[in-house]
Structures are given as structure tokens and as C-alpha cells.
Amino acid sequence: MDMKTSGHPANPPLEVHDLTVAYDQKPVLWDIDFELPERSLTAIVGPNGAGKSTLIKAAMGLIPASSGYTLIFGKPLDKQRHCVAYVPQRESVDWNFPISVMDVVLMGRYPHLRLFQRPGRQDKEIAMNALVEMGMDAYHKRQISQLSGGQQQRVFLARALAQDASIYLMDEPLAGVDAATEDVIFLKLKELRDRDKTVVVVHHDLQSVPENFDRAMLLNLRMVACGPVSDVFSEKNLQKTYGGRLNILSQMIEESRQQRFVREQDS
């Protein structure tokens, strides 16, 4: 069942307002504001320590904010948490915990269950279908610790798919995966967007942004820019975000854009 909140068609799926996060009185994020539309795939980019992971954790209420708030379809986060699926960084998970692949994916069904209710046949079918989508159904009985890093990431994405949320917040889902897994993940992210989902991805590979995302959020403690990739993913904004470390990378991005333009003209 799709959990879009049709009673609030005028409200964007995700709004964050006046968000500030500080550790030991040192700001990590400062006065962040943005809205994201339905049917969008957004990359959050910025240098190490820019607050990218902190942003989605604070927006989810997983870490305390000094100020600010999140709205989901115009309602407070606490009333709409079931609409949001979260994929954490792989490094933050204890992969030695004794649990099977299927049990991990079934966790995505918990927001649909009553207190103390166990997953039923339909939940297990949905979980298996999510594993099929990620090419991991053959591993459903395997212990999660026995999988490679790329396979573990696919399982975490399957868990998010099983939740059937409206908004997906993912923290570096492409970090450290092999090329085949990267292709599968990008394909699945685009499919989610095309199914009217709002997908937000903390991402580190700038060169792949223009090809795979329709929106970008450039962050370095403050919001530098947020909007369509064609508008905000510019050398000027990247220089503001990263400082003077982008000369070679900017050339690569420009070459990628030119190559894409040529392909579009040829087609």
C-alpha cells in the first residue's frame, strides 16, 4: 500500500525549517531550510565534516537539534514517521549481530504492524519481493554477517523497499560498493522516484551527480544551494561548497555534461 498522504496535496512531502545542530556548543549545521517535492531524487553533497549525515539524522529526529523542525506532508514528524524510511551508513551497523537476511528485511514491515504483532504471510511475501528487486532473494536464509559489503547494502535497501514509504533518506548507500551493486542501486533509486517517492541520498561522488540525480543540495555547515541539478550544480556553487579544491573535479563534471549533451543530440 502506498502511504502518500493524499489529504495534504498542497504540502510538500518533506520540509525542514530553521534547523541548527550543535555539539558542545559548536555548530555542525546552521539555520538549514529546504523543501523537497514528490517524485524527486536529491543528492546531498559537501566536504567531509559538512554535516551531511547530521542533516538527515536530525531531520529524522535521530539526534537532537538546537532549533528547527521537520514537516512530513505538512504534519509534525512524530505523526508521520511511518511515511519515512531511513538507510543508515553501513559502517554504523553491527554486522556481527546474529540475524538472517529475511529478518533484516522484515524489519521494514514493522511500521505497518500493531504493537507486539508478528509479521504475517503478506509481510513475508512483500519482504521476499523486495529481496528479488535487489537480487538478494537467494540469500534470504543467510546470516547478514556472511555477506559482502555490497550485498549488505542491497539488503538494507530491500528493507527500505519493504517498508513502502513515501520518503527515503539514505546515508551514503553507494559508499564502498562494487560497480554492479552501484548500477543496481542507482536503478532502484530512479525507480522509486518514478513511483512518486521523495528520495534523498547523502552522496560523495560528485562526478556521478548530473547523470543520476535531478536535484542537489550543496552543504557546508550552511546551505549553499538547493534545487534542480541543472540550476544549482554549477562550478560557482561547488567552489563555495568545497573551497579551492575543485579545479580538476570541475573539469571532469563539465566534460561529463558535454558528453551527455552530445548523446542527447545524437539521440
Image (cartoon, rainbow, N blue to C red):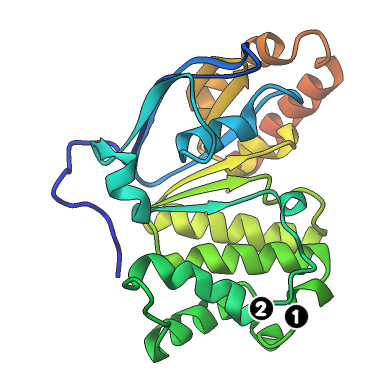
Q: Amino acid at mark 2?
A: Val
Query: Does residue 8 appear left or right of residue 183 in this picture?
Result: left
Q: For residue 171, which numbered disc appears in the image?
A: none
Which of the two labelled residues, at mark 1 and mark 2, occupies the earlier sequence position? 2
Q: Quadrant of the N terminus?
A: bottom left
The residue labelled by disc 1 is 143
Rendered residue at 22%/36% (across/down): 11
Residue 262, given in percent of the width and then of the height, sits at 66, 37
Q: Nearer the viewer, residue 141 or 129?
A: 141
Q: Quadrant of residue 257?
A: top right
Element type at mark 1:
loop
Rendered residue at 58%/36% (across/down): 43
Kindly tell me whether residue 154 is visible in this rendering: yes
Q: CA distance from mark 1 to mark 2?
A: 6 Å
Q: Quadrant of residue 101?
A: bottom right
Q: Amino acid at mark 1?
A: Gln
Residue 205, given in percent of the width and then of the height, sits at 75, 37
Element type at mark 2:
helix
Residue 199, given in percent of the width and then of the height, sits at 48, 47
Rendered residue at 74%/63% (across/down): 181
Residue 37, given in percent of the width and then of the height, sits at 35, 37
The residue labelled by disc 2 is 101
